[in-house]
Image: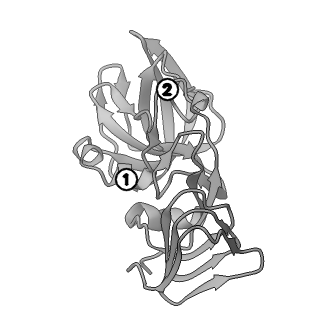
Amino acid sequence: MRCLSISIIFFTYSLTTYACTCVRMTSFCDFIQSDYFLDKDGMVCLAEATGNANSDNGFYFYEMKVVNLMYGSIQTGNGSYMNTDSTFWAFTEQNNTCSEYPLSGNSEGQYIMAATYKEMGYSFLTCSHDAFLYESTMIGAIINESSLFTEIPWEMDTIQANQLPQIVNNCTNCLLNLDLSATHNAPFVYEAGSTLTSTAFVNNNIVYKAGDRVRLVPGFKTNMLVDFGVYLESCY
């Protein structure tokens, strides 16, 4: 099956969450499909901190244990930070405050990591959703990139843990089923491979497309001053 059933929810987001100047958050899918990720021996894995960490020349190094290698392979490394077939060293600048996840050798929990290899070890990019906490339900810029402007509601994908293998192997913007509930304040085209269901308030120029049917259920309403269209048209 090519398409996944992934819902989208909307949030307003403050740039103060990151002490940096991100305007857009590159999605996990866009990142792992990028030339940069492929050229830098990128790997995707489920990993957890071992507790080993070190500070060295303005960088913070922390060792991660691979629970499940989902894509790529672990590079050997060199110098003081050698990797094995089940552990790798990641690093960040000590003053880096733009990361989405705790950069600590004692970070609790398991993380999905899309890491790229450099001479010193594996690293992560700012303004990119390339590492996030692994949970039964995960929310974030996983398939679609996100705007970080506070005045614009931005999309965050919600996925289940059992969908991750498909997402890593075949990221797609074509969602099998799509459920919408938030107010549509920005123009957008929403697409689903099969069924699109909406209880949203359409307050801007919006188009719904679905391969089989569009369901406008109780709670749905539209501002009569804006354009709204419905098409039976599959996105795959």
Above or below 186: residue 87: above
Q: Position of residue 36 (x, y in %)?
A: 26, 43
* Pointer 2 with pointer 1, Cβ within 8 A: no
The residues bearing labels 2 and 1 have C-alpha atoms spaced at a distance of 26 Å
Q: Position of residue 161 (x, y in %)?
A: 60, 61
In this view, the residue in front, 217 or 100, is: 217
Badge 2 amino acid: Tyr
- Which disc is residue 62 wearing? 2
- Please tell me which residue is depicted at 38% across the width and 9% down the height of the picture: 57
Can the viewer see residue 73 in this picture? yes
- Considering the numbered disc 1 on the image, is that residue within a helix, a strand or a loop? helix
Q: Position of residue 77 (x, y in %)?
A: 30, 31
Above or below 212: residue 72: above
Quarter of the figure with the N terminus: bottom left
Q: Position of residue 15 (x, y in %)?
A: 57, 32
Badge 1 amino acid: Asp
Residue lying at the far right of the rendered structure? 218
Q: Earlier in the sequence, mark 2 or mark 1?
A: 1
Q: Quadrant of residue 37?
A: top left
- Which disc is residue 131 wearing? none
Q: Label 1, on which residue?
A: 30
